[in-house]
Amino acid sequence: MEAGTQTTGLTPGGLPPLGLKRRRWGEEIIRALLFLAAAISVLTTIGILIALLADSIPFFQEVGSRFFTDDSWGPLFDANPTFGIWQLLNGTFLITGIAVLVAVPIGLASAVYLSEYASPRVRKVVKPILEVLVGVPTVVFGYFALTFVTPEILRAIGINVEGFNALSAGLVMGIMIVPTIASISEDAMRAVPQGLREGAYGLGSTKRQVATRIVFPAAISGIVASIVLGVSRGVGETMIVLLAAGLQPNFGINPTEGYATITTFMGAAADGDNPAGSIGYESIFACGLILFVLTLVMNVIAIRFVRKYRQVYE
Amino acid sequence: MAAPPPADAAAVRMPGAGFVRHRSTQLKEAAFAAVLLFLLGLALLTLIVLLVDIFVDGVGGLSGQFLTDTPSRIDPSSSGIGPAITGTLYLMAVCAAFIIPVGVASAVYLEEYADRNNWFNRFIEVNIQNLAAVPSIVYGVLGLAFLVRGPISLGNVVMAGGLTLGLLVLPVVIVTGREAIRAVPPSIREGSMALGATKWQTIWKQVLPASIPGIATGVILALSRAIGETAPLIVVGAVAFLTSSSVSLLDGQFSALPITIFGWTADSETDFHALAASAIIVLMVILLAMNAVAIWLRNRYEQKW
């Protein structure tokens, strides 16, 4: 724009030319300050990386391959500490797995219902209620899992669970993830062009057939993205697991037992007294690094998938 | 106009019309819809059960004294959330003081100044997207390494906790702020520039005032996310049970509502669970109020251009 006005020497009224290249220093300074503010988010990422690496590197130097070869996790033991990450990964993915088994059917059913079946009025009522689930702090879900789901539901129906168990944590985490899966999947389904649905109806399809054979496959990349993001939220979730699944590192797939996860170890170790520089302190950062990498990879995958459906239909 | 009869009824009444579904097909259709509704209902039912359970557990413990007393690990009957409430208020104040200027400035830069062809600007955007998915406990680790110890070394104080929460929810403010700024039509900017205003004058006098309701909504949503965060506060060293309600920004320990809730819930003495439930009610009421204000703001000041 400015370049265009500079070509005229004098304006018809004899006024000085527009767009005279006068540097406005105030404007430049403001622009620089705004840029600095925007750069804070980049600095945050760099800060996270530095924080995680600075204390992880000495940890890995000391622990070395024992991180993968030790068969138990106990870096805080004074005598014979052990450093095998597998128990924590076992706990993390067992509980997240249970959560996904709950959240995928409920989340996808909600998405299909809201996108294909619900009248606008029903959607207007149901969607905000689902959003309330997003707003519930996870410590509240943790309270619910420990004091209600474990004793009043699981034990009441005859499942003999320990006080801390993966099942209760997983079930409640599943409910926590439902809105993530439901809302992203619903967006993807609503982005499917109406013409595809009408074509299928024209060929005699029923509503169910349109939903399951036309809309669902057409929205599949968004649906996959929603599930990956849901898993990522589960893997990074701390409070539900800390309260309901306990702190005991464990191997196995028995959901009635307690399991420690990456996040619960971090929370518990940071809560305790671990002087900076001790191996216990460093292990918090090593776990943080694993967690950061896991969730970052999942998020990048999810963004890819979302972009894919946007490119196709929007 | 008479409403056309529903398709199903027509199919039943006019068997010759070629529109009849087989009875088994009709059954499958109904069963499928019923399953969808059942699963959706399950999610809503869980939410209701959760709210009712907490209400039943905690409503008896609510009193003026509960709001002001200091918490106890020994005697549930004379225990309260005084230090937790002051701590949470201070945390929110620090958080707001950080996210409002930084978040709005970032949003203004990205919407009004950034050249999207520049790789660094695109990187900022992707980065904000990724930051939103970083687990909250990792922000706690960031706060621990840089704010509590390390280069800034504030110690386990409210300032460190509030800034950690601020970094955590900053993406929320930036994203909603950008939407609000984008909603201001270009003609407003062009009109202002045509009258001789500089770019910054245009932003400051026209664009920002017009987008304040949207920005305010985003800030409240961000704070309502921050107020319930527990894991990062555990890592930066917030304390569940403090014996004094006085807080200072840069000195001394602090507590917070979610941390106290965590402490009481994790207590093996189940007498304390009722206290946790009472504190949850207080937290949820605050959350509800914040969300109500956000929705009211959005509806009240929604600008139609």
Image (cartoon, grey):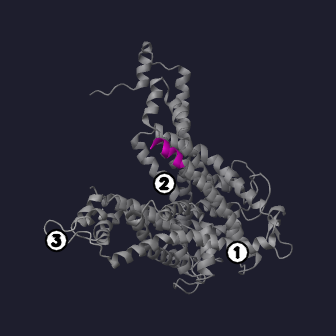
Circle 1: element type = helix
- Residue occupying image coordinates x 50% and y 49%: A183
Label 3 sits on residue: A15
Circle 3: element type = loop
Report the side of A133 relative to A95 (left or right). Answer: left
Q: Label 2, label 1: how many angstroms apart (C-alpha)?
A: 38 Å
Question: Type of residue at label 3?
Answer: Leu
Whole-percent x and y of residue B291?
A: 43, 62
* Residue B103 covered by magenta stretch: no
The stretch of residues the image draws in magenta is A306-314
- Magenta segment, principal secondary structure? helix
User: Looking at this rendering, what residue extends furthest in the top direction?
Assistant: B16
Q: Are marks 1 and 3 on the same chain?
A: yes
| In this view, the mark in front (2 or 3) | 3
Label 2 sits on residue: A131
Whole-percent x and y of residue B85?
A: 51, 75
User: Compared with residue B1, is residue A51 higher up or lower down, i.e. above or below?
Assistant: below
| In this view, the mark in front (2 or 1) | 1
Marks 2 & 1, CB-CB < 8 Å contact: no
Label 1 sits on residue: A55
User: For residue B174, which quarter of the picture?
Assistant: bottom left
Local crowd size for mark 2, using a 10 Å CA cut-off: few (<14), some (14–19), many (≥20): few
Q: Are marks 2 and 1 on the same chain?
A: yes
Q: Earlier in the sequence, mark 2 or mark 1?
A: 1
- Residue occupying image coordinates x 43% and y 33%: A195
